[in-house]
Image (cartoon, rainbow, N blue to C red):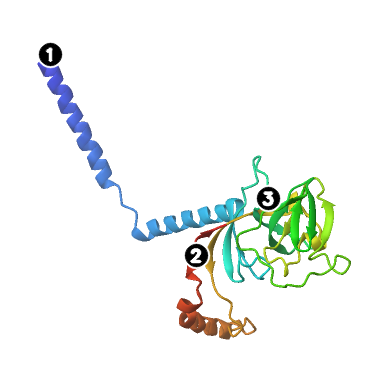
Amino acid sequence: MDQDFLIQDIQRVERKKEVSKVLRRRKQKPLWREYLETAIIALVAAAFLRIFVVSAYRVSSGSMGDTLLEGDYIFINKLAYQYGGSPKQGDIIVFKYPNNPEKEFIKRIVALPDQTVQIADKVLYVDEQVAQIPVYSKHIDKRIIPGDLSFRDNFGPYKVPPGEYFVMGDNRDDSRDSRFWGPVPRENIKGKAVLIYWSWRPDPEAPRWEFPYVINAVQWLGYGLFNFPSRVCWDRLGTPL
């Protein structure tokens, strides 16, 4: 009986030796191949996230000031309203402009489907209640324009149609929004703004992109290196929305 156990132990040791020999004989991957595989995996993951989950958007106007400033770069969550989720009052959304789907706008939802919107002397009412004022929203013009001249300061009452959303810019006196061109259909909404990941203060003296682009690329390289510390809005980076 002891001999049987001894034979089994010897066989196990021999098997382990054979496995070790096989593993040692295997050629290790070249370093360049490991880097290449890692890069391919990273690119595929980034493309998947870009197409299905997260998108980037650059703020190109002051209509959402001071919540969003021109030169802010933000992440958009494309899945925020999928799988049963619905847009809510106060959400900042990126959407296709109803009058020209080739353009994308960013605004704040102030009223949901079937709610009634009214603006009286710049004060926003939703279902006859004063709407909550976003922290960084603002009025930059003290004038109050009558409703028969403009819908900016006096509007409605207007009931939002089913499946559509009434949006406004936080810079209430300098925003073209649902007051002027109507509500946003649900299918036009691309996603919810979630984070400012980069912010670059615009500069009217910055080089322009014009043909031949090689010259502009060199100018931009020098401009970026020289102005990088001063024109980055460091306090805005990572700001949640």
**Relative vertical location of residue 4 with respect to residue 236 in this rendering, above or below:** above
Q: Crowding near pointer 3: few (<14 within 10 Å), some, many (20+)?
A: some
Q: Are marks 2 and 3 in contact (CB under 8 Å)?
A: no
Give me the C-alpha separation between circle 3 and circle 1. 80 Å
Going by the picture, which residue comes out furthest to the right? 148
Type of residue at label 3? Gln
Residue for point 87% across, 69% down: 149
Residue 120 spot, x, y in % from top left: 79, 60
- Pointer 3 or 1: first along the chain: 1
What numbered label is drawn on residue 27? none
Residue for point 77% across, 72% down: 143
**Relative vertical location of residue 235 with respect to residue 189 in this rendering, above or below:** below
Which residue is label 3 attached to?
Answer: 89
Give me the C-alpha separation between circle 2 and circle 3. 25 Å
Residue for point 37% across, 61% down: 32
Left or right of 52, for residue 42: left
- For the N terminus, give its image quadrant: top left
- Pointer 2 or 3: first along the chain: 3
- For the C terminus, give its image quadrant: bottom right
Give me the C-alpha separation between circle 1 and circle 2. 74 Å
What numbered label is drawn on residue 1? 1
> What is the count of numbered marks?
3
**Element marked by disc 1:** loop
Q: Quadrant of residue 56?
A: bottom right
| Circle 2 or circle 3, nearest the eye | 3
Q: Crowding near pointer 1: few (<14 within 10 Å), some, many (20+)?
A: few
Which residue is label 2 attached to?
Answer: 237
**Element marked by disc 2:** loop
Type of residue at label 2? Leu
Residue 99 in view in this figure: no
**Relative vertical location of residue 222 with respect to residue 65 in this rendering, above or below:** below
| Circle 3 or circle 1, nearest the eye | 3
